[in-house]
Amino acid sequence: MAILGRRPEAAGPAHTVVAEPDVTVDVQLNAQRLFDDGARDRDERRQELGRDLVSAAYLRGDFVLSSGMRSSFYFDKYLFETKPGILRRVSNLLAEEIPPGIDRIAGTELGAVALAVALSLEMGLPFVIARKAPKGYSTSRAVEGELYPGERVVVVEDVISTGAQAILAANRLKEAGGEVVKVVAVIDREQGGLPAIAAAGYECSALFSLSELGL
Amino acid sequence: MSAQSTTHDGIWELLAAGGVTPEGDGPAPYRPLRAPSAATELVARFAKVAREAGADLVLVWDDLDQIVLGQLLAAQLGVGVARAYDADGLVAIRDDAPLEGRVLLVTDALRDPRTLAAMRGIVELRGSTVAGIAVLVATDELREAAGDAPLHALVEWGQRAGGAG
């Protein structure tokens, strides 16, 4: 049985999708994949997931990133986070990046919330949502959900560029009483984000770098 | 880079009505809603500085205080206002007024260099021209972030009376 889906519109300026996302999901094959996932080699699963991420979410065009940088490409996280077949495999691999003894997952609004939910379900851990506060004087709560003093938290991010948003979220979680143990991301754009996060005092890793994705 | 400023007579008092005092390591956020009359008077003086940019449009970051500041200034300049915002990693524009012509970036002070860079980037991406950056309180960090864009500052943080300089 085949289920056909439609590719959603992405926000921002005009763009082109480099490759058509995998919109045809063969349910039987997917079920078999899931069954086999535990036994398959991690590298093989990573490679397959990397190809699917590029196929689903890599856009070419002329973009201005929130960091202010111009870019000829953009990873639209919503194009992979909204596909359960991809999201499930992302969270499965992200779970392997989580150190032992973690109390809570944290996802930054809005893009990483779906990742936090998926990872929360994957690992059976509760999660919180870290709000953005780009001006530093937002009146909204910094952290939505329950976070208790001293809890060991992992921040999950979708795409890391400069790392500024992840650092901001980690700092706000720290201010809220959490101990940020690590920042894990799906894609590192290799624009200084991981070193910046490390320099801010947080361990960090990403499932994929751009070069690993062949971009 | 150019920078113009008016005389400081009374300006710090007007700024203080909106929460910006000369004390501290840097300017606090300006909150025009705290004292609308003072804000109107302050922006009338701000407009004398900003008018030199010859802008067709004011662009602000999509934040309430910045919007109010931009609205007051745009009214003085007789131009429209557009808002830039972070659309989950991409900079986008709420097209209240079309982003075209000479665009003046307006802010109270430097909150985040990325925000200023993002506003510049989206103006250039749309094929418009950055007419300059109009700021209530200029700092060294803002000058650095402004790069070669003409700077129109109401006051300089380093020249405040009673400040560290």
Image (spheres, coloured by chain):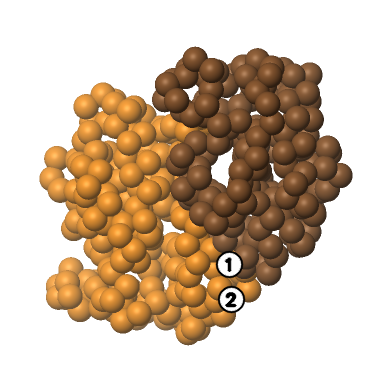
Question: Measuring 38% from the left and 60% from the top, which residue is drawn there?
Answer: A161
**Distance from Cα at disc 2 to Cα at disc 1:** 9 Å
Q: Are marks 2 and 1 in contact (CB under 8 Å)?
A: yes
Between residue A7 and residue B122, name the one nearer to us.
B122
User: Which tint is chain A?
Assistant: orange
Q: How many marks?
A: 2
The amino acid type found where label 1 is placed reads Ala
Q: Residues within 10 Å of mark 2 (few under 14, many from 20)?
A: some
Label ID, residue A10: 1
- Name the side, left or right, on which B9 lies relative to A208: right
Question: Measuring 82% from the left and 42% from the top, which residue is drawn there?
Answer: B77
Secondary structure found at label 1: loop
Q: Position of residue A83 (x, y in %)?
A: 45, 67
Q: Nearer the viewer, mark 2 or mark 1?
A: 2
**Subunit ID for the residue under disc 1:** A
Which residue, given by chain and number where applicable, does mark 2 sit on? Answer: A15
